[in-house]
Image (cartoon, rainbow, N blue to C red):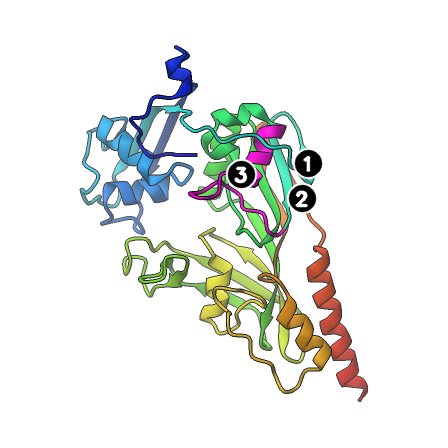
Amino acid sequence: MNDAPSNKTTKDSQAGIAPAREPIKRTAEVSAQTHGLRFDQAAAQLFPEFSRGRLQQWIKSGDLTVDGQPGKTKQKLQSGSQLVLDAEFEIETPWQPENIPLNIVFEDEHLLVLDKPAACTVHPAPGLNSGTLANAVLAHCPANAELPRCGIVHRLDKDTTGLLVVAKSLSAHASLVEQLQARTVSRVYRAIVCGKLISGGTVDQPVGRHASVRIKMAVYKTSVASSTAKPAITHFRIEERFSQHTELRINLETGRTHQIRVHMAHIRHPLVGDPVYNSRYRRSAQISDSLDESLRRFPRQALHATALSFIHPYTGEESSFSADLPADYKALLAELKAEEKTIHTE
């Protein structure tokens, strides 16, 4: 979806058809973490379902106010200030539906829970207009074209597998986004990392865009060290130990871009196969040729979103879902276990 303002005349407007619009009403309070940020930066953190370009447009039009008054995109906000978004969401982009199979774990009239495969990008982006999960969702649920980001309320990296939830109405979308912001959505991952951890723990370090490498994120000592840094908390515990690797069960308290991958690399236990944060594979002298070959050939970061829980937007009941480990992850685990068995029988 192209959220940036555009002066182009759309096909619909040429035909005299008014673009689809939905009323949007949101409120949020500037927290200690967003204190001192620019209006548009704070809004992007408090209303993450909308792009910064669209939020800037609403600030300029007066649809997004601070303490009841219009503001400027670059003005610094104070902790405790109240933001109110009262606008209309106009569907501007023509993401195209595509008949791509979806692995549907659950569906009702309000939402979808999907098990995303590897090598699947969630949203279209510059240079990538087709073949994404959003294109597939639009084919399955055409009405989702009228929702922010096609109703997909949280994302997984292209090569991360597992569960994500898609809203099918604006009210369901608002409820799920609110739960994500309140950190009441439970997201559990399985991951295989390099090195042998002794115990579980927590990484509580802000994550923001890398200063010089745009495709990377980085840990910052404080969330104000970078204009893009946001608080990020990752809890992990040991699932299984191997001689040179560890499988972890990871629970996200926050959901930042590349959060698990960045935090694990930060504590010097990067994910196996991670092409961005663990790109230099080094063979350990203690492993077999077979395991070495499996590690070299593993095609992606060994990360799978295995469990997801939230309050259903309409029933009010807790909804919990799980997804089996994908075949490539299972095969790598089997190789690690076989290696361990060999070590202990020698």
Element marked by disc 3: loop
Residue at the outermost bottom position: 346
Q: Amino acid at mark 2?
A: Phe
Element marked by disc 1: strand
Asked if one can make out residue 202 in the rendered structure from this viewpoint, the answer is yes
Residue at the outermost right position: 345
Q: Amino acid at mark 1?
A: Phe
201 to 228, vertically: above or below:
below
Element marked by disc 2: strand
Quickly name the residue at label 3: 130
Say which of marks 2 and 1 sits in front. 1
Q: Amino acid at mark 3?
A: Ser
Q: What label does residue 256 carry, if any?
A: none
Residue 308 in picture, x, y percent from top left: 61, 46
Question: Residue at point 48% right, 28% down?
Answer: 147
Say which of marks 3 and 2 sits in front. 3
Q: Residues within 10 Å of mark 3 (few under 14, many from 20)?
A: some
Residue 103 in picture, x, y percent from top left: 69, 41
Q: Which residues are magenta?
A: 118-140
- Marks 2 & 1, CB-CB < 8 Å contact: yes
Q: Report whether 61 appears left or right of 312.
A: left
Q: Report whether 250 appears left or right of 222.
A: right
Quickly name the residue at label 2: 321
Asked if one can make out residue 317 in the rendered structure from this viewpoint, the answer is no
